[in-house]
Image (cartoon, helix red, strand yellow):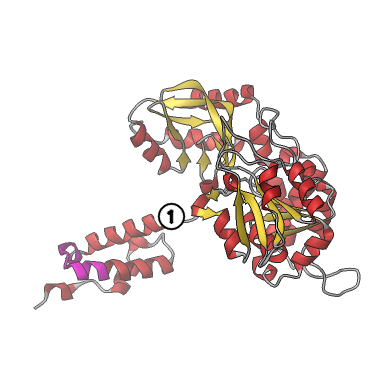
Amino acid sequence: MNKFRTFPQIGALIDDESLKEYPFYLKAHFCKSVVAKLKANLDEKALDKANILEEIKKEIKKHLHKDLQSVINASGVVIHTNLGRSVIDESIFESSKEVLCNYANIEFNLENGKRGSRYALVLEKLKMLFECEDALVVNNNAAAVFLVLNSLCFDKELITSRGELVEIGGSFRVSEVIKAAGVKLLEVGTSNKTHLKDYEKAINENTKMLLKTHKSNFALIGFCSEVSIKDLGILAREKGLLSYYDLGSGWCENLNAKLVKNEPKIKDLIKYCDILSFSGDKLFGSVQAGIILGKKELIDKIKENQLLRMLRVDKITLAFLNESLKAYLEKDYEKIITLKLLNDNLEHIKEKALKVQNELKFQSELRTSKSLVGGGSMPDKTLDTFVLAFKGNALNLQEKFRTKNIIGRIENEAFVLDFRTILEKDLSKLIKIINTMENL
């Protein structure tokens, strides 16, 4: 007789007292999958119910730890792409709840009782904030770039600098997006130097647009030069062409003075080009969105593109973006958490670090260090910060803290927590978690 026929029944495993804390769907799934795996491997552990239950619990816990959950960002990277980029302020969340938890006038005109525009109120605020003719919102800046090019330059030629054909996260390349949009790409200049005359010489009867892409995620230093969007815009107007600035990550107001060098405000840049787009969740500090600003006739043409339906944003994005725009217009910058962290002064960061250090049962060392902006923004700029460094094997400590949802970094062979990116509301939580850890 096959001894593996004596497996406990699935129903008996699901109903076992040791699994009562877990929801039924998880117990049902992992009881079946664990038993199937043990049977397939003819594992002796499969003959013992206690062993099977331990395997099931292990798989459930592994699954739960993968679930979406909050973490403490002690990495020192303010706009951390892998940790959700910009944090939404709780007051903005609370203000959005009334819309999100009820039916709302997303596409309904309350004045005439007819269908309304999904974007109306948000676009009005964008026009006020950036003093532009018109605006549009799609689901991210890559979508914005694709839609702009496909709408305004399809089957025509676009000229751009070879040094600006950047690759962003996830191996997405500007050059590939251009081609996918049905646009013919003509590169000019070299990887380190591009002059206005390079664009001028390349213009021909099939040219439709001059594109400038902001080097958001890398920096060129040394023997290099580029053409400003102002000069590119002037050339485009002279030649009857369109000028487009793919800004990627751009700032609006109240940015730390140490970061603004060579980083013009969006409001200034839009004066020099026909179309500009940027990410809503990077330096702008709101939700993921691709925000397009520009001439009304061009935005109208983009709105006619059938692809807009596929790239549009939902009511959650619109609600949060709407509240972020209100905060900017009211100059209530405390509600923009990204700005708050980037503008945080060194004395306050030190206070946060000392508060935690003084309440820890483990020894740590207060050190000065540098934080990064992150999120493909300002790669050549850093901000002063304070960190707590812990003794011991840095890799082991990094893993131990990570299992508790605390994301730090290794610096000078020590595991450290950077207090620029640790939210004030998380300090007590951080202390409690660390003090419950063993053998630190």
Q: Tell whether 227 sits left or right of 326.
A: left
User: Is residue 285 a member of the stretch shown in magenta?
Assistant: no
Q: Residue at x 22, y 60 (%)?
A: 51
x, y (%) of residue 120?
82, 62
- Displayed quadrant of residue 228: top right
- Which image quarter is the N terminus in? bottom left
Q: Residue at x 37, y 40 (%)?
A: 399
Residue 104 in view of the camera: no
Q: Tell whether 164 sits left or right of 416.
A: right
Decide which of 353, 291 is in the foreground and name it: 291
Q: Tell whether 33 sits left or right of 432.
A: left
Decide which of 203, 417 is in the foreground and name it: 203
Q: What residue would you read off at disc 1?
A: 66
- Displayed quadrant of residue 137: bottom right
- Displayed quadrant of residue 8: bottom left
x, y (%) of residue 72?
52, 40
x, y (%) of residue 256?
69, 31
Residue 156 in view of the camera: yes
Q: Residue at x 79, y 43 (%)?
A: 267
The stretch in magenta equals: 36-47
Q: Residues within 10 Å of mark 1 (few under 14, many from 20)?
A: few
| Prevalent SS, magenta region | helix
User: Is residue 45 a member of the stretch shown in magenta?
Assistant: yes
Q: Residue at x 69, y 36 (%)?
A: 263
Name the amino acid, label 1. Answer: Lys
x, y (%) of residue 297?
83, 62
- SS category of the residue bearing label 1: helix
Decide which of 5, 136 is in the foreground and name it: 136
- Which image quarter is the C terminus in? top left
- Image mark count: 1
Q: Tell whether 81 sits left or right of 440.
A: right
